[in-house]
Image: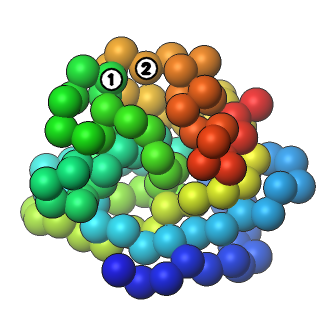
């Protein structure tokens, strides 16, 4: 897996907020999804691919771990995409999966240095 980067990405989707350092990483998005920037993703343990985190998933992705930086279309197969792994986030700009709330996502992401307002 490619390493982590710290860059000055333009916040063209309005997802980031605050001054906490933003860091990014490239991950594989599981096939069969079309997700917007700001989607809160979890990692599927068996495949190490990421998908929208739903609280009842049971495959590892139920635990939110990263936030998608740009829109992604993986409907035709798994694709690589950049995700934010640290920084401040605007809660109203996030897309969350079934069973999650902004409060549950905030709590899950805080220990990972992703801070949801």
Where residue 34 appears, x then y in whole percent? Answer: 27, 49
Q: In the rendered image, which quarter is residue 109 located in?
A: top right
User: Which of 37/104 is in front?
Assistant: 104
Where residue 41 appears, x then y in whole percent? Answer: 39, 45
Q: Are marks 2 and 1 in contact (CB under 8 Å)?
A: yes
User: Which of 13/85 is in front?
Assistant: 85
Numbered label attached to residue 78 = none
Secondary structure beneath disc 2? loop
Q: Is residue 115 above or below residue 73?
A: above
Secondary structure beneath disc 1? loop
The residue under the point 60% across, 27% down is 107
Q: Is residue 2 above or below residue 104?
A: below
Where residue 74 appears, x then y in whole percent? Answer: 21, 59
The residue under the point 69% across, 77% down is 6
Q: Is residue 50 above or below residue 56?
A: below
The residue under the point 23% across, 49% down is 44
Which residue corresponds to mark 2? Answer: 100
The residue under the point 36% across, 28% down is 97
Which residue corresponds to mark 1? Answer: 55
Quadrant containing the N terminus is bottom left
Q: In the shown orientation, is residue 6 left or right of residue 74?
A: right
């Amino acid at each position: 897996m490619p390493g982590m980067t710290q860059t000055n990405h333009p916040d063209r989707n309005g997802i980031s907020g605050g001054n906490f350092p933003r860091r990014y990483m490239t991950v594989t998005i599981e096939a069969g999804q079309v997700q917007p920037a700001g989607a809160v993703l979890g990692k599927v343990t068996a495949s190490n691919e990421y998908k929208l985190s739903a609280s009842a998933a049971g495959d590892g992705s139920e635990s939110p771990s990263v936030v998608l930086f740009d829109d992604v279309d993986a409907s035709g197969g798994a694709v690589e995409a950049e995700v934010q792994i640290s920084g401040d986030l605007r809660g109203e700009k996030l897309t969350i999966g079934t069973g999650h709330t902004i409060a549950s996502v905030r709590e899950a992401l805080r220990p990972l240095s992703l801070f949801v307002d």
